[in-house]
């Protein structure tokens, strides 16, 4: 029995709840996947059928960021395109911080994974010759985004979920919250879970755990991310001893609907790819003042340009203008966006669409190598939860669904190579007990979450400074101190602890990076510093389980 006590834990607890494996209900699997977006489900499909797999998901299987992805998937299929050009565009958008070897993997393995999606029956849009239709998005030098109208993520996820649901070796448990990774001597043993309310504590023991739980967009009040994106995967990984990297790089999508009743609906970059223009409140075009690629400049550049125009005109939004395209075309090419705008009284064939930037994607996450491995044996991360260096300081549009595919399949290949070892390590219950001296206290967790989100929006948004970051840090640490060792009795409280902890690391990284690079813009350090800059900022988790 390994007894774990909080000795040098400081404010950071190793586990969010007490448990004893002697009495804890449990099940055995070979592989547990946390998260049901494209990365999680495709990893399951890419893993040999001999492996007994469990997918757990916090809400229902269809609630995740991948499902909401509108634009598409980047892949160099045009006869004038190549993986090398895709590589160059990814590196350019990433503002000097991408891991070149991992980007090569991404672009070189793109086409074969898209072919697999087609075999599964994903219904991508095609041209008259039945070739996959290719559109353009920001910072791409070629048309290379395959899509299904403006609901690509939904089409891909629906198809993959149907395929995985047919597999006898895969079990899916919805409304299951991953509290913590169970480890012993830096070896992954499984996942500690509870139900939606925080009850029914249970362990799923497995020698392989894959974290595909998505990003941490909900640290911000205004985001395109669903409610589940509270960064639990990153927080639990860190508690278990994994490393977190590039947390300061938060992507703000330039064009999110700005309407009193909806400020989280994405207006896909593909709309600009098909010719939409940005106008300020006076109706003036402005992007040519900011970048030669104008509306199709890298996403961080467009978001900052909009931010500046909003500041100049004192407005809360700018406009997206695609009124030069006819209605029938827009209805067919962007059915979801067209219908949604119309439901708010905006006919995009006649009216400008009010838009503003909003948090959209977390470039940072759990540090992995090019095979999805973390520094904890048996623990992998993939998709938005992971940070393998392909996005650098600013993700190139439509590289994220692709990332889930390429690296999900690589994890499946790793598992296939070590299947015999995996089977030998399965079915073993670790002997562990965790007990903390908790304080019982009434906490209004939803209110504190809202306060944190507003704080992150205002102080750690598109433009940051030492002053705004230090003031955010002060407040975050104050709340963290108030909650130190306070018992988490429900999942909202667990989310709050995860969010507070991640925010403090994010702000710390943003303070450490005294330059502007990609999505990280400091008004007090507006230049990119190529002389004395910090490469990737990595925080090492505190593993106290041994
Ligand atoms: C979009 O459709 O604009 C989003 C695409 C992405 O985030 O890659």
Image (cartoon, rainbow, N blue to C red):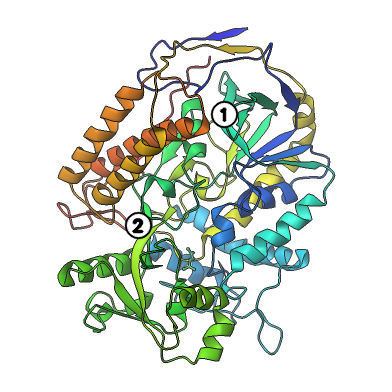
Q: Where is residue 405, by image quadrant?
A: bottom right
Quadrant (top left, top right, bottom left, bottom right) of the N terminus: top right
Compare residues 52 and 421 and report the one nearer the observer. Answer: 52
Query: CA–CA distance between discs 1 and 2?
Result: 42 Å
State the residue position of label 2.
96
Residue 322 position within the rendered picture, expressed as x and y whole percent measured from the top left: 41, 85
Q: Is residue 37 left or right of residue 535?
A: right
Task: Answer above or below: position of 176 versus 425.
Answer: below
Residue 300 position within the rendered picture, expressed as x and y whole percent measured from the top left: 33, 63
Task: Answer above or below: position of 513 versus 73.
Answer: above
Residue at x 36%, y 24% (from the top left corner): 483
Q: Is residue 479 left or right of residue 361?
A: left
State the mark number for residue 265: none
State the residue position of label 1.
198
Residue at x 69%, y 60% (from the top left corner): 158
Packing grade of label 2 (10 A; few <14, some 14-19, many >=20) is some
């Amino acid at each position: 029995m390994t007894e774990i006590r909080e000795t040098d834990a400081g404010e950071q607890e190793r586990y969010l709840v007490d448990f004893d494996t002697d009495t804890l209900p449990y099940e055995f699997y070979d592989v547990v996947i946390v998260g049901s977006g494209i990365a999680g489900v495709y990893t399951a499909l890419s893993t040999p059928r001999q492996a007994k797999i469990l997918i757990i998901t916090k809400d229902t299987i269809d609630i995740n960021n991948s499902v909401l992805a509108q634009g598409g998937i980047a892949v160099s299929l045009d006869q004038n395109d190549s993986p090398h050009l895709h590589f160059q565009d990814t590196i350019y958008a990433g503002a000097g911080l991408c891991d070149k070897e991992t980007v090569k993997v991404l672009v070189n393995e793109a086409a074969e994974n898209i072919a697999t999606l087609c075999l599964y029956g994903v219904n991508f849009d095609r041209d008259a010759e039945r070739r996959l239709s290719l559109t353009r998005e920001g910072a791409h030098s070629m048309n290379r985004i395959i899509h299904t109208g403006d609901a690509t993520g939904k089409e891909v996820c629906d198809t993959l979920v149907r395929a995985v649901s047919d597999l006898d070796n895969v079990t899916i448990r919805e409304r299951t919250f991953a509290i913590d990774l169970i480890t012993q001597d830096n070896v992954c043993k499984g996942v500690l879970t509870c139900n939606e309310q925080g009850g029914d504590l249970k362990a799923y023991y497995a020698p392989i755990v894959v974290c595909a739980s998505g990003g941490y967009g909900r640290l911000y009040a205004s985001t395109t991310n669903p409610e589940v994106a509270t960064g639990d995967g990153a927080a639990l990984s860190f508690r278990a001893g994994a490393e977190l990297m590039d947390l300061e790089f938060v992507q703000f999508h330039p064009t999110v609907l700005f309407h009193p009743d909806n400020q989280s609906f994405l207006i896909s970059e593909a709309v600009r790819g098909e010719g939409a223009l940005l106008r300020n409140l006076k109706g003036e075009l402005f992007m040519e003042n900011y970048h030669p690629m104008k509306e199709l400049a890298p996403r961080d550049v467009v978001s900052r340009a909009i931010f500046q125009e909003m500041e100049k005109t004192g407005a809360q939004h700018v406009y997206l203008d695609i009124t030069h395209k006819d209605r029938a075309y827009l209805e067919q090419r962007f059915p979801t966006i067209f219908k949604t705008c119309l439901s708010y009284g905006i006919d995009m064939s006649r009216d400008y669409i009010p838009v503003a930037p909003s948090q959209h994607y977390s470039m940072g996450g759990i540090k992995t190598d090019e095979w999805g491995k973390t520094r904890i044996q048996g623990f992998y991360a993939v998709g938005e939860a992971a940070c393998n260096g392909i996005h650098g300081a600013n993700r190139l549009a439509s590289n994220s669904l692709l990332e889930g595919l390429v690296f999900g399949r690589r994890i499946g290949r790793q598992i296939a190579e070590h299947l015999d070892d995996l089977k030998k390590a399965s079915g073993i219950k670790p002997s562990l007990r965790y007990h903390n001296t908790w304080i019982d206290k009434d906490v209004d967790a939803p209110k504190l979450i809202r306060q944190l989100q507003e704080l992150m929006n205002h102080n750690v948004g598109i433009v940051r400074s030492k002053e705004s970051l230090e003031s955010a840090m002060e407040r975050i640490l104050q709340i963290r101190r108030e909650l130190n060792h306070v018992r988490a009795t429900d999942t909202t409280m667990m989310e709050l602890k995860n969010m507070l902890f991640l925010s403090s690391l994010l702000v710390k990284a943003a303070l450490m990076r005294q330059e502007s690079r990609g999505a990280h813009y400091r008004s007090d350090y507006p230049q990119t510093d190529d002389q004395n800059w910090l490469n990737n900022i990595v925080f090492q988790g505190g593993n106290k389980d041994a």
